[in-house]
Image (cartoon, rainbow, N blue to C red):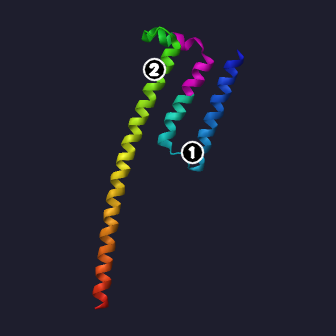
C-alpha cells in the first residue's frame, strides 16, 4: 500500500467520523448526511481498490479515469444543488404561509382587544 493510499483512507475515515459527530450533535440532518456518507464510502472504496477507477472508466468508455472523477463530481454537485433548491423553495413557501397566518392571528387579536375595550 502506497503512502497516498494511506493518506486518502485516513482522511476519508476522519471525514466520516466528522460527519457522524455532526449528526450526533444535531448540526447535520440525516437526510443530508447520507450524501456525504455515500461519497466518503466511494472514496474509501477507490482508495483501497486503486484499479477500480480504471475498470469503471473503461466500462463507461471514459478515456482517462481522472475525467470520470470530475464528471461524477460535477453531476453529483448539480444533483445536490437541485435538491437544495427544491428544499429552499419549499421552506420559502412555508415561511410565506406562516407569516400570513401570523399576520391574520395578530389582526384578530387586535380586533378582539378593541372589542373588549369598548
Placement of 43 over or under 50, stated as above or below: below
> Is residue 52 within the magenta segment?
yes
In x, y percent, where is residue 44? 60, 24
Label tally: 2
Would residue 103 be found to the left or right of residue 33 on screen? Answer: left
> Is residue 70 within the magenta segment?
no
Q: Earlier in the sequence, mark 1 or mark 2?
A: 1
In x, y percent, where is residue 6? 69, 21
The stretch in magenta equals 41-54
- Residue visible at 58% across and 11% down? 51
- Residue visible at 58% across and 21% down? 45
Placement of 63 over or under 103, stated as above or below: above
- The quarter in which the C terminus is drawn is bottom left
Would residue 32 be found to the left or right of residue 5 on screen? Answer: left
- The quarter in which the N terminus is drawn is top right
Please rate how many residues cluster around mark 1, counting C-alpha atoms within 10 Å: few if below 14, some from 14 to 19, many from 20. Answer: some
| Residue 10, quarter of picture | top right
Residue sticking out furthest to the bottom: 118
Question: What numbered label is drawn on residue 103?
Answer: none
- Residue visible at 38% across and 41% down? 85
- Magenta portion: prevailing SS class: helix
Q: Secondary structure at mark 2?
A: helix
Tell me the residue that label 2 is attached to.
71
| Residue 4, quarter of picture | top right
Tell me the residue that label 1 is attached to.
23
Q: Nearer the viewer, mark 1 or mark 2?
A: 2
Placement of 88 over or under 37, stated as above or below: below
In x, y percent, where is residue 42? 54, 24
Q: Secondary structure at mark 1?
A: helix
Amino acid at each position: 500500500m502506497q503512502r497516498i493510499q494511506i493518506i486518502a483512507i485516513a482522511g476519508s475515515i476522519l471525514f466520516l467520523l466528522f460527519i457522524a459527530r455532526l449528526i450526533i450533535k444535531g448540526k447535520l440532518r440525516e437526510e443530508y448526511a447520507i450524501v456525504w456518507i455515500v461519497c466518503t464510502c466511494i472514496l474509501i472504496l477507490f482508495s483501497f481498490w486503486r484499479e477500480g477507477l480504471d475498470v469503471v472508466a473503461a466500462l463507461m468508455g471514459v478515456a482517462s479515469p481522472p475525467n470520470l472523477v470530475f464528471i461524477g463530481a460535477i453531476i453529483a454537485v448539480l444533483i445536490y444543488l437541485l435538491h437544495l433548491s427544491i428544499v429552499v423553495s419549499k421552506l420559502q413557501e412555508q415561511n410565506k404561509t406562516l407569516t400570513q397566518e401570523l399576520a391574520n392571528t395578530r389582526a384578530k387579536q387586535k380586533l378582539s382587544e378593541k372589542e373588549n375595550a369598548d
